[in-house]
Amino acid sequence: MSTETTPNFLIAGERRSGTSTLAKWINHHPSVYICPRFDAAFFVDDDLRGRLDWLDGEIDLTRWARGHDTDSYLKWFRDAKPHQPAVGEKSADYFYWPPCADRIMTRFPQMKILLIFRNPVDRAWSHYWNEVGKGRETLEFEDAIAAEESRIAGSDYARLHLSYFDRGRYVNSLQRWIARVSEQQLHIVVLEHLIADPLNELKRVYRFLGVDPDLGLELAGKRYNHNWTTIPREFWTKNAALTRIEWGINRMVRTATRIVVRDRYRRLRIGPQLERLTRIPQKQLAMPDHVRRMLVDRYAPSVRQLQEKLNIDLKCWA
């Protein structure tokens, strides 16, 4: 296999922190190739990856190695061109899921790791509603946060998908990666800094990847993968019969949209407009103030540790 088809960087996480946006931006650079299969998560266990139904207990982590060979993974990058020295993929669960660091760095010890951290309170809120939209989550947000510790202790499925609070303690997952990579192999972007100064932040990413920082800047500032989750209007939640009718209407709308609109991002954009009869966009809902204050307080020690470890200013998370 030629070196041109061997990946040398990963956008490894964190989920709901702007990984899709960054991947879209840098994929516009002529010297960068990103596998078009976003979040295919080769290094995450198949028992959990994409799973929508609940699973109790721990999975057998040894099964992963038996079904995942390096040559199969390298085929993801066979369309990379010789003039594209930066070759990689985006899978936002790599950073958090514990086995991934060893699996990746054992096979690709020189791999560069790109991470994006977002205000953990906002990340948890966005993650929660994303799981509601997928049908994985049925609890109210505050109840889900309260139940999280016991959930993830008893279920690897919950640990990967329903870890709203725990994923935001970035310093815990970061320790695992720091133990496996050199300082030169790790680059961290703060989403709020990326939004405030997209050009300069993107140029820093390009320097990290070793490509011309003055090219591929056209998409800087454009946002992708907003949280498009919608929730039923109050009228449709008055009783079980109305809820079933709303569910049926919404299912038909989504099926028709999927057939007619093939592009995923376009479908996500227009979907909420087509569902207006029965649903409203989740982004119209604000986190209750008392819940936000509680999460800010709970995250404060982790945020302080992260600031000290990385020597970065995270006042924007206050």
Image (cartoon, grey):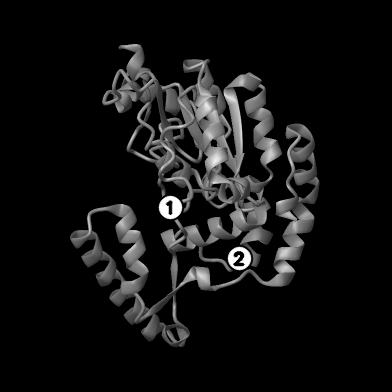
Residues 226 and 161: in front is 226
Q: Residue at x 49, y 69 (%)?
A: 282
User: Distance between the Cα atoms at labels 1 and 2?
Assistant: 24 Å
81 or 120: which is nearer to us? 81
User: What number is the disc on residue 260?
Assistant: none
Q: For this rendering, which residue is in front, 317 or 255?
A: 317
The numbered disc on residue 224 is 1
Q: In this view, does 316 lie above or below 93?
A: below
Q: In this view of the protein, can residue 199 be seen by the observer?
A: yes
Disc 2 crowd, CA 10 A, few/some/many (<14, 14-19, 20+): some
x and y percentages locating residue 122 in the rendered image: 62, 57
Q: Residue 168: x and y, percent?
A: 65, 47
Q: Does 13 sit left or right of 79 as displayed?
A: right
Q: Do the residues labelled 1 and 2 touch (CB within 8 Å)?
A: no
Tell me residue 232's x, y (percent). Answer: 43, 77
Please give left or right for residue 183 compared with residue 72 in the image: right
Question: Mark 2 falls on what kind of element?
Answer: helix
In the image, farthest residue toward the top: 2
Residue with the mark numbered 2: 141
Q: In this view, does 56 lie to the left or right of 301?
A: left
